[in-house]
Image (cartoon, rainbow, N blue to C red):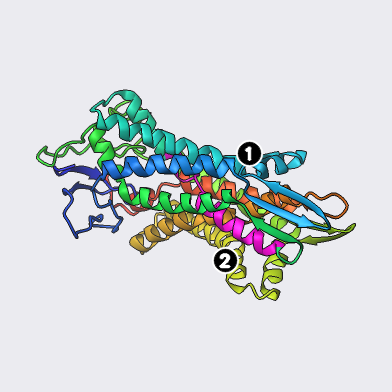
Amino acid sequence: MSASHWLECPDCGLLQVLPPPKVHHVRNCVRCRRSFGAGANHGDAARALTLTALLLFALANIYPFMGLEFGGRKSSIHLGSDVGGMAGHDNLIPIALMVLAISILAPLGRLVALGLVLVTLRRGDKTAMVANLMHFADRVRGWSMLDVFLVGTLVALTKLHDLASVTVGTGLYMLGALVVVLAFLELAIDRHAIWEQIKPGPSADTPPRPDWFGCVDCGMVQEPGDRCVRCGTTLHRRKPHSLHRAGALVATGFILYLPANIYPVLTVITLGRGSPSTILGGVVELARGNDWPLAAIVFTASIAVPLIKLFGLSWLILSARFRSGKALTDRTRLYRMIELIGRWSTVDVVVAALLTALVTLGNIAEVLPGLGVLAFGGVVFVTLLATEFFDPRLLWDAAGENHA
């Protein structure tokens, strides 16, 4: 991406010129300060990292993940075993599907799609299939949560060290290496650069038109039409029914938050005696065991972050509804923060799924998931969807700062 081109900021809706990348310089929206990336697309490094990530993903699924020994009995799990553990309980099948999506389907789908895009662009092929693959990779990016899964695994290991002898398998080491490689992969690619390589947007030399707007999915600035000329998706000036959808999902999240904290998330049964635990009870248990760092992580991810998301999104929706023009930049930054931290609420769901799958020693020791994990999983899911459906450009539209 060497030429300047027109771009609509996806956070505030300002039509502006995105300059070419320059070493040691950053490119931010001139109004809301959203980052547009470095613009550098390290193609060879990105392809190598993608191939490495796919290899590590395969190894993480092949080798044992964790093992447990208690009372002379042993059990072990692989990366996908937690899905089966949750699916064994009929009322928790939605949680099993959620864990399957964030730990297997979304990461694998994004890596395969991104790898095909990078290889195909290297050969100079810019067919519609490349745009479809890139669109798919973009859409599943927010649901690929192997880093969250790794933190959840560490919390699960901490919870088990007082119960039994726990062994760390090769699969877990492969997962740790995979998370590091994925972090470097995100640094090696630039979304805007890849889309511009697939099909460039209007050059900065082209005089802008008042009816131009950016595609919600790929960001290409274009004239009104039925479908985007680059990614082929249905064109919308703003995300359709954004406030209604986000508002309904946030209201659902508030309703589910109460049972998520009242009902037990897990029940640990040892030698026939059960000990149910809520989310807050799990935090207290970690703190009593002098595991303060993990207790702070679980408290933040499972109690503080859901409330921040629910109240923060409520404020943003009401601000757009009542056409408030105050602190627009601050409210846009709040949305970006909610978008960034929202995925970490999934930690407790991962912990419940892992413990349910691993601790299956019959009358000696067993962990049973409770209704609390179902309600909490619902809170996480609806708030993630609400964040995705909410269009922050509506804040600026309502204040009269845009033409929309």
Task: Determine the residue positioned at 66% across, 57% down.
Answer: 167
Task: Determine the residue positioned at 55% across, 50% down.
Answer: 383
Q: Which residues are magenta?
A: 139-160
Amino acid found under the numbered disc labelled 1: Leu
> In this rendering, would 297 be left or right of 138?
right
Q: In this view of the protein, can residue 60 be seen by the observer?
A: yes
Instruction: Residue lying at the far right in this picture: please name it.
Output: 272
Q: Residues within 10 Å of mark 2 (few under 14, many from 20)?
A: some
Secondary structure state at the residue bearing disc 2: helix
Q: Position of residue 92 (x, y in %)?
A: 72, 42
Name the residue tied to disc 1.
Answer: 97
**How far apart are the alpha carbons under marks 1 and 2?**
24 Å
> In this rendering, would 314 be left or right of 91?
left
Q: Predominant secondary structure in magenta?
A: helix
Residue 297 circle label: 2
Q: In the displayed structure, would residue 290 be above or below residue 393?
A: below
